[in-house]
Image: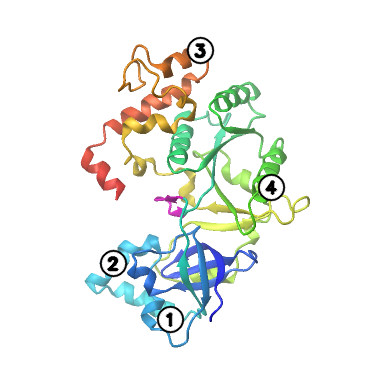
Amino acid sequence: MKELLRGIVTRGVGGLYGVRPVSDPGKEILCRARGILRQKKISPTVGDDVLFSLSDENADPREQSAEAPEDHGRASRDRRRGSSSMRRERKENRGVDVDYVIDEIGERKSLLIRPPVANLDYLFAVIPCASPEPDLLTADKLTVIAENYGIEPVIVLNKADLAPERAKELTGIYRTAGYGVFPLSAVSGEGVEDLRAYLSEISRSQPEGGHVSGAFAGASGAGKSTLMTALFPSLDLTTGAISRKIERGRHTTRHVELYPLRPDPGKAPDAVFWLADTPGFSMLDFTRFDFFPYDELAASFREFDDCLGNCRYTKCTHLREEGCAVIEKMKAGGIAESRHDSYVRIYEEQRKVPEWKRKQNAE
C-alpha cells in the first residue's frame, strides 16, 4: 500500500502545484493532480489540505493533467477550440520532472472566489490612520466579505504614530464592533510586537496537525507591504527553485501563494503562520461578493446581532425606519455611526444589482 502524505497547496499554475508537507513546511514538493479529481469536478486550490503520494509509474498519463482552478475556464475553452497555446503549455510541462500526485482534497472551511484561496482563517484589514486618510467603507467591505465566508476579521491600524487621536477613535469604533484591533506603526515598529505575539498565539493554539492561515488586505497606501516585511523579515527568502519550475509557462501570471512563516521564532519556534500573499489582496474585488441577498447584509455586521428580530417591523431594513433596534443601539453608542453608514451604502449598492447578475456572480 502506498504511503499518503498530508500537505497544503501553496501555489498552482498550469496543472502544476507546490505542496508543503504539514510535517515539514520548509520543504515544497512539486505535484500534479490525479485525473479522478477532475472527473469529480474538483480542482486543487491554494490553501487546500491534501493527501499526496509518489506517482505510479504505470498510471494513465491522462491522470497527470488536471488544471489549476484559476486556469480551468480558459483550459476548457482551449480544449474545445483545439488551442495551440494549450498544446504549448502541455509541451512545456512535459519537461518538468514531477514525482508526486495529489490524491485527495480535504473538506474546505471556506473558498474565496477572487483571488482564489481556500481555508483562510483570518483576514487582517490594514487601515492607515493618516497619509492617506482612512477609507472606512473599504475597510468595512473587507469585514463583510470575511464575515460572509466565516473568516475572522482583524483590524490593523497602521501609521498610528502620525495621528494618535485618530488611531484612538478608530480603535474605539472597531472594538465596539467586536473585532480585535492593533494600532501600530510599521515604520517605527511601535505596536508591531503586539501583533506578532497575536500571530504566534493563534498559530500555537491549533490542535496537532492543524494550521492557521491569513491574509493582509487594505486600500492602496495603507502600508500593507511594509507591515508584512516588519512582521516577517524572511518573507523574501521563502521562494526557491520550485517557483521557477511552476512559473516557466509563457502565459503564467502570479496568483495566490502561501508562505509558511514563523512570527516569533525566538519564543515560539514551532508556531507556523501560513501567509496568503498576492497582488489581489490589495483590495478584494467586492463586486464578486454581491451574490448573497442584500436583505441578509445585516448578519455580516456582528454588532447588529442582538438587534436582529427586535425591530418594530418584521421586514426592517435597518436603514432609517422608526422603531429600528439597530438605529436605537447606534443612538445609544453601541454601534459607531461610521459602521451604520457603511451598512447603508453597501446595502444600497447591493440593492441596485439586477437579479440576473446576482445569480451570475454566484456561479
Q: Is residue 176 placed above or below 123 in the rendered structure? A: above
Say whether disc 2 or disc 4 marks the residue closer to the N-terminus: 2
Say whether disc 4 or disc 1 marks the residue closer to the N-terminus: 1
Say whether disc 2 or disc 3 marks the residue closer to the N-terminus: 2
Q: Amino acid at mark 2?
A: Ser
Q: Which one is in front in this view, the residue at disc 2 or the one at disc 3?
A: 3
Residue for badge 2:
76
Q: Which one is in front in this view, the residue at disc 2 or the one at disc 4?
A: 4
Q: Amino acid at mark 4?
A: Ser
Q: Is residue 55 left or right of residue 262?
A: left
Asked if the magenta segment contains residue 319, the reply would be no
First to last magenta residue range: 110-117
Residue nearest the observer in this picture, 91 or 56: 56
Contact (CB < 8 A) between labels 2 and 4?
no
Q: Amino acid at mark 1?
A: Arg
Contact (CB < 8 A) between labels 4 and 1?
no
Measured as percent of width and height from the top left, residue 227 is found at 63, 43
Residue for badge 3:
332
Q: Which mark is residue 94?
A: 1
Contact (CB < 8 A) between labels 2 and 1?
no
How many marks overall?
A: 4
The answer to which quarter of the image holds residue 24 is bottom right
Magenta part mainly helix, strand or loop? loop
